[in-house]
Amino acid sequence: MKIIKKQIRTCIACRNKFTQDELLRLQCINKALVSFTKSGRSFYLCQECVDCKEKTIKSLYRQCKNKADYEIQLKEIETIWKTK
């Protein structure tokens, strides 16, 4: 009998560990925040951190290494993620 393991990932804002299917996977491409495009480096955010914008925006600045306006981009991606 094969044991199936669930992938555990860490949220970049709160540093808590979750299963991969509970997290939103994002990446920065040319100073823009986008959903993961299946190539390149990515990072994860949990639902609680997506809702709490202040702490999350600071983490996005650090992860993407620039100070673009991520709050608007995150709201757009969040609405798409919640409809799935």
Image: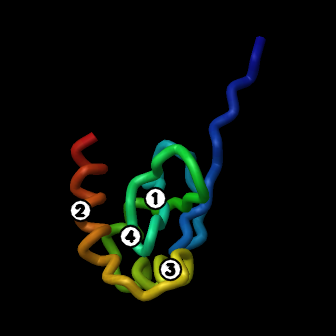
Q: Are marks 1 and 2 in contact (CB under 8 Å)?
A: no
Identity of the residue furthest to the top in this view: 1
Q: Are marks 4 and 2 in contact (CB under 8 Å)?
A: no
Horizontally, is 44 left or right of 7 in the view? left
Q: Residues within 10 Å of mark 3 (few under 14, many from 20)?
A: some
What amino acid is labelled 2 in the image? Glu
Given residues 10 and 3, the one toward you in this image is 10
Residue type at mark 4 is Ala
Which residue was labeled with disc 1? 26
Q: Which residue is mark 3?
A: 59
Q: Which residue is mark 2?
A: 76
Instruction: Name the residue at 59% across, 54% down.
Output: 40
Identified by mark 1, the residue type is Leu
Residue 4 lies left or right of residue 19; in this view the side is: right
Which mark, residue 32? 4
Give the vertical position of 12 relative to 21 (above or below): below
Relative to 32, is 17 on the left or the right?
right
Judge from the rendering whether residue 9 lies leftward or rightward of residue 84; answer left or right.
right
Helix, strand or loop under label 1? strand
Query: Closer to the N terminus: mark 4 or mark 1?
Result: 1
Dot placed on the residue nearer the N-terminal end, 1 or 3: 1
Describe the element under mark 4 as helix, strand or loop. strand
Mark 2 vs mark 3, foreground winner is: 2
In 3D space, how far apart are the residues under numbered discs 4 and 1 (Cα atoms)?
10 Å
Mark 1: give few (<14), some (14-19) or many (20+) Cα within 10 Å: some
Cα distance between the residues tagged 4 and 2: 12 Å
Q: CA distance from mark 1 to mark 3?
A: 12 Å
Q: Hey, which residue is sitting farthest right in the picture?
A: 1
Q: Which callout, 1 or 2, points at the residue further toward the start of the chain?
A: 1
- Alpha carbon of mark 1 to alpha carbon of mark 2: how far? 12 Å
In percent of width and height, residue 28 lies at 47, 67
Image: 79 above or below 57: above
